[in-house]
Amino acid sequence: MGVKLNIVPYDAPPPSDLQQMLETSDMVWVLSSCATKLTQQHHDKLAQSCFNGKPLYLIADNYPCVRDVSPLAQLLFNMTFDGDEGIRGKQLSSCAAGKHQACFEKHAITHGLHHMAEGDTVSHIHPLGTPWLYNATPVLWSSKGHALVQVVEPHAVGGCRAILDGGGLTRIVARWGASTERWIMNSFAWLAST
């Protein structure tokens, strides 16, 4: 399987350039920053791409570093990134039955993981009501018991498969390790298996 990777510079491209990138990409990963880079036109193009079935990974950090992904999560999934939890690299392990704190659930994106860094600073993800058109499932729980990562599956009427990650920025960048490599590979494979 060949995959085309488009890396967008720190500043968001003009919406017309984003549209061309979306047409030639297999999936979209959006890393948020503390400054707003995406306009409503960007959000509309990303939303249309998702509605057309292109997989999406939204990566955030603590508030206020959710400014680009939180409006997109709200537009697409009726969910939002919020909060500022200072964790400083707590290690998560597999969830015990009924436990939803400092752990990860069994899922394709956690397959093969024994431990995982929570992230240094994280935001949690919560629904603003009923997520329409999607089945959302928390797969990673913060040490404070909040949903840190949720995966969404489209219903039969369409839409995209997505990962909403409230601690991905510091988990991927600041806490890189063997479990992070596995997380990235698993996430990529799960998103690509639509």
Image (cartoon, rainbow, N blue to C red):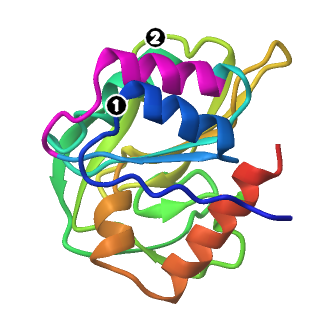
Which residue is pictured at 76% across the width and 52% down the height? 192
The amino acid type of the residue labelled 1 equals Pro
Q: Are marks 1 and 2 in contact (CB under 8 Å)?
A: no
Q: Main secondary structure of the magenta part?
A: helix
Residue that label 1 marks: 14
Name which quarter of the figure residue 136 lies in.
top right
Q: Which is more N-terminal, label 2 or label 1?
A: 1
Residue 143, given in percent of the width and then of the height, sits at 32, 59
Residue that label 2 marks: 129
Residue 129, given in percent of the width and then of the height, sits at 46, 11
Q: Nearer the viewer, mark 1 or mark 2?
A: 1
Label 2: state its secondary structure. loop
Q: Which residues are magenta?
A: 34-50
Mark 1, Cα crowd under 10 Å, few <14 / some 14-19 / many 20+, is few
Residue 9, given in percent of the width and then of the height, sits at 32, 54
Name which quarter of the figure residue 194 lies in.
top right
